[in-house]
Image: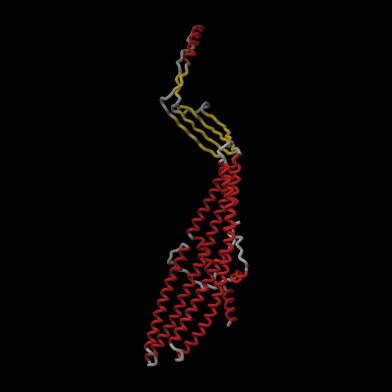
Amino acid sequence: MRKLNIWMLFFSISQSAFSQSQLDEYVAAGLKENLVLKEKNISFEKSILALKDARSYFLPSLNFIGNYITADGGRTISFPAGDLLNPVYSTLNQLTSSQNFPQIKNADVPLLPNNFYDARFRITYPLLNTDIHFNSSIKKQEIKLQQYEVEIYRQELIKDIKQAYYSYCSSVDAIDIFRNAQQLVNQNLKVNQSLQKNGKGLPANVIRAESEVENISSKIIEAQNISLSAKYYFNFLLNKPLTDTVIYEKQILPDELIASLSASPNTSGRSELFKIDAGIRLNSTVLKMNKSYFFPKLGTSFDLGSQASDFKFNNKSRYYLFALQLDVPLFNGNRNQYKIAQTRLDSKTLQLQKDFVSDQLQLSAGIAQNNLRSALALFQSSQKQLVSAKSYFNLIDKGFKEGINSLIEFIDARNQLTTAELQVSINQNKVLNAFAEYQRQTTKTTIK
């Protein structure tokens, strides 16, 4: 019997390649359609656009600037042109006996321009600005952070989809088990009714058989409701209508399950650790940027335009303007030093967080492996119990039909068989769920 059970276990494991096809399709569909994953992918796309935006600051900027001003009144500047030049002009007219030098009036020039425009193209370009370089590097590292965030949820979603599918298939198996039990109790009811009709049975046996039929019917209804809830949750993960049909596939243990029991759990490739490493690198870049606060910033601008009154455009209105801007920080109340100190503390916090998460992941992987061992042991034990329950039921069923065993013994044997079949299904579901959890705890990141 022991050799038979071991052979059955390894036979079921060797067939795993055929049991994963439908589940793989559902996993692929879930990764494509899940709403939360779509939302996280949008955030990832936004981080890529943020990097492109940061890199755009390395390029020159071209802008068109236009101003129009019209005003009347206000302050004026008096210029005594007549008082200064008229005496001279009068003397010149007398000397030349002519009127070649006319008299002019004093000028009052308004400070506010009237009907004045200024239109120009302005090109600006940063010649030296370390903040632009650091900002581009920070945005690039933020993309990595977002990638790991998406990867973490993707791995969690795969586990959830697998476990939800295993639970659904287990609920379908439970319905089949109860339906098989229903056939047995219906057959037993017919036998007892026939015995009573022929005067060889008791009415109490018929009543008890009818009670067993109703009991199994209620369990079928309960199992169907559980299966319906499992289907709803599974379709929810795949972002499908809750009532969509889920294709059932008989579940068997995967090939790599046995190997995972002997191997030591390795969590060094977890996305959570790589995410913290990316955060440490990003914080290091921020620290370098804060330390470079004393670097001067040098930029240039070039204006090409025209300005005049009454919308005149000629050689006198056109102009160009070239400028250099230099910004040298000298003192700002030690704010930069405070930022440097804060960033260094952030680095220490991230390192401590990495150590804690590493230990936590190792603990979770070890617990997941132990749970898998326990679940597999229970599954193997329930398989043996099922073999015994089948043999026992066959003997009692034969004896009952021959009048050797009582109805109570038949019902007890049938209950044992149904319970054993359910335990096999339940424990197999526990093994598959535990293995999905173990795979999640030891999955290595695909992002480098």
Q: Position of residue 55 (x, y in %)?
A: 57, 45
Image quadrant occupied by the N terminus? bottom right
In the displayed structure, would residue 333 be above or below residue 157? above
Residue appearing at x 40%, y 85% in the figure = 189
What residue is at 54 percent from the left and 33 percent from the top? 303
Q: Is residue 326 above or below residue 215?
A: above
Residue 271 shows in this picture: no
Q: Is residue 212 left or right of residue 96?
A: left
Q: Quadrant of residue 266?
A: bottom right
Q: Nearer the viewer, residue 32 or 380?
A: 380
Residue 118 in the image: state x and y as whole percent.
49, 31
Image color mode: secondary structure
Furthest-right residue in view? 263
Q: Is residue 53 above or below residue 270?
A: above
State the residue in front, 380 or 199.
Answer: 380
Q: Position of residue 244 (x, y in %)?
A: 44, 67
> Residue at 53% across / 81% down in the picture?
387
What quarter of the picture does the C terminus occupy? bottom right
**Is residue 397 visible to us here?**
yes
Residue placed most toward the observer, 197 or 291: 291
Q: Position of residue 267 (x, y in %)?
A: 60, 62
